[in-house]
Image: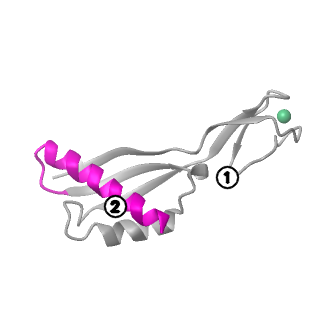
Amino acid sequence: MHEASIAISLIETVSALCQKEGYNSIESVRLKVGKAAGILPDALLFAFDVAKAGTLASQAELVIEYIPLGGFCRECGSQFESQERYIFACPDCKSSAIKITRGDEMQIIDMEVN
Ligand SMILES: [Zn+2]
């Protein structure tokens, strides 16, 4: 499962940060996930809960903020936002000359530590 390896590397990253700053445990992690990032939030939450056992993040809660996909059309200049996971054509003029500018990222926003 793709989300399992993401959860493991996420926990490694936050644990390393937590240790480096001299804290003992992680309370919560806020994560920004783009709709087009190809990550299923439920699967990631589940994988996180499994992977956190025995780590500095064993008590941590993962909070996911879902970022809609956004972009613009090179044809008509329209800016769009979509709750879809993929978009292939401009919602206004149906041109396929679109550029996706956000929604494929995954980034830690912040975390609470003790
Ligand atoms: Zn267009």
Image coordinates of residue 32 in percent, x first then y, are 46, 47
Q: Give the color scheme: rainbow, by chain, secondary structure or one colour.
A: one colour
The segment highlighted magenta reads 1-25
Identify which residue is drawn at 19% across, 48% down: 18
Q: Position of residue 100 (x, y in %)?
A: 67, 38
Q: Quadrant of ligand 1?
A: top right
Q: Nearer the viewer, residue 52 or 25?
A: 52
Question: Disc 1 to disc 2, how far (Cα)?
Answer: 27 Å
Q: Is residue 15 magenta?
A: yes
Q: Is residue 50 left or right of residue 58?
A: right
Question: Label 2, on which residue?
Answer: 8
Residue kind at label 2, given as amino acid type: Ile
The amino acid marked with disc number 1 is: Gln
The front one of 50 and 65 is: 50
Q: Which mark is residue 13?
A: none
Q: Could you tell me residue 55's position as x and y percent?
A: 20, 64
Write down the quadrant of residue 84 in the picture: bottom right
- Residue 9 in the magenta stretch? The answer is yes
Q: Residue at x 19, y 69 (%)?
A: 54
Which secondary structure, mark 1? loop
Residue 10, percent from left and from top: 34, 54
Residue 83's disc is 1
Left or right: residue 114 versus residue 92 is left
Label 1–label 2 contact, CB within 8 A: no
Circle 2 Cα neighbour tier, 10 Å, few/some/many (<14 / 14–19 / ≥20): some
Towards the viewer: 39 or 114: 39
